[in-house]
Image (spheres, grey):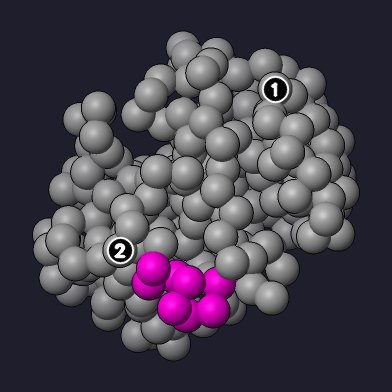
Amino acid sequence: MKNIIVDFRIHNEEKESLISRGYTLQFCPPSSLLYEAVCGHPDMLLNILGNKIVVHKNMDSKFISSLISLNYKVYKSNLSLKMEYPYDICLNSLIIGNLLVHLINFADINLLALSKDKKLINVKQGYTKCSTCVVNDHAIITSDISIAKALNLEKIDVLLIPPGDILLPGLSYGFIGGATGLIEDNVLAFYGHLDHYLYGKEVLEFLKKHKVEPVFLRNGKLIDRGSILRLH
């Protein structure tokens, strides 16, 4: 069974597109502690480290049980989420290969404790996972300069794109990481279609370079629904 975690509000067309490809969807329940715009975004509410998952400490118990039934060890965050930045970012770390990338001072200590095998990379961007589309363990796409600089130093291939042109209802714009997610090792899903994205051509060329296939879950502009998180 192929399980992925998505925002509970995803469009019906996106849902059907994933189900038709053989995926079972785990719908991330909302948190009233966050702005409505991001209240169900998986990349704000949990983080996956191999067979371990850290969820925010007020996560719905039924959702936790569903993760445990999939043979994951589930841990709760030490911190409670709050609406104000940077108190909403405690679980928004980017995990890529043996790296954990975040505004480290605001990362949850329970997440850090479970990441002792990772090299910690400090960046200025707190919405680290939202801001970063992982193409593979050696390649990312981001609009954030601090993430791009830090990961270039780690020999990660970075496509740096300008910010904007990604919808996030309720806020001015969204991030490329929140509009995408790897659903297989070499398959990247998009909420929307790159034909409607200003930098779609550059993204397609980068994916081709890394032999990653794009899958478009819906026609129309890219929309940030919080990263699609794959359960192995």
Say which of marks 1 and 2 sits in front: 2
Q: Nearer the viewer, residue 56 or 154?
A: 56
Q: Which residue is mark 2?
A: 13
Distance (Cα) linking label 1 and label 2: 30 Å
The secondary structure making up most of the magenta span is helix
Numbered range of the magenta stretch: 16-23
Q: Residue at x 40, y 62 (%)?
A: 15
In this view, 22 is above or below 37: below
Q: Which residue is mark 1?
A: 58
Left or right: 41, with 159 as reference point: right
Q: Secondary structure at mark 1?
A: loop
Q: Nearer the viewer, residue 112 or 73?
A: 73
Q: Which of the 4 quarters of the picture holds residue 153?
A: bottom right
Inspect the magenta stretch and tell me whether residue 153 lies in it: no
In this view, 106 is above or below 18: above
At which x and y percent is residue 164? Answer: 20, 43
Q: Which of the 4 quarters of the picture holds residue 175?
A: top left
At which x and y percent is residue 99? Answer: 68, 53
Residue type, mark 1 in image: Asn
Inspect the magenta stretch and tell me whether residue 20 lies in it: yes
Q: Residue at x 72, y 18 (%)?
A: 79
Residue type, mark 2 in image: Glu
Left or right: 148, with 97 as reference point: left
Which comes sooner in the sequence, label 1 or label 2? 2
Q: Residue at x 26, y 66 (%)?
A: 218
At which x and y percent is residue 89? Answer: 55, 27
Quadrant containing the N terminus is: bottom right
Q: Secondary structure at mark 2?
A: helix
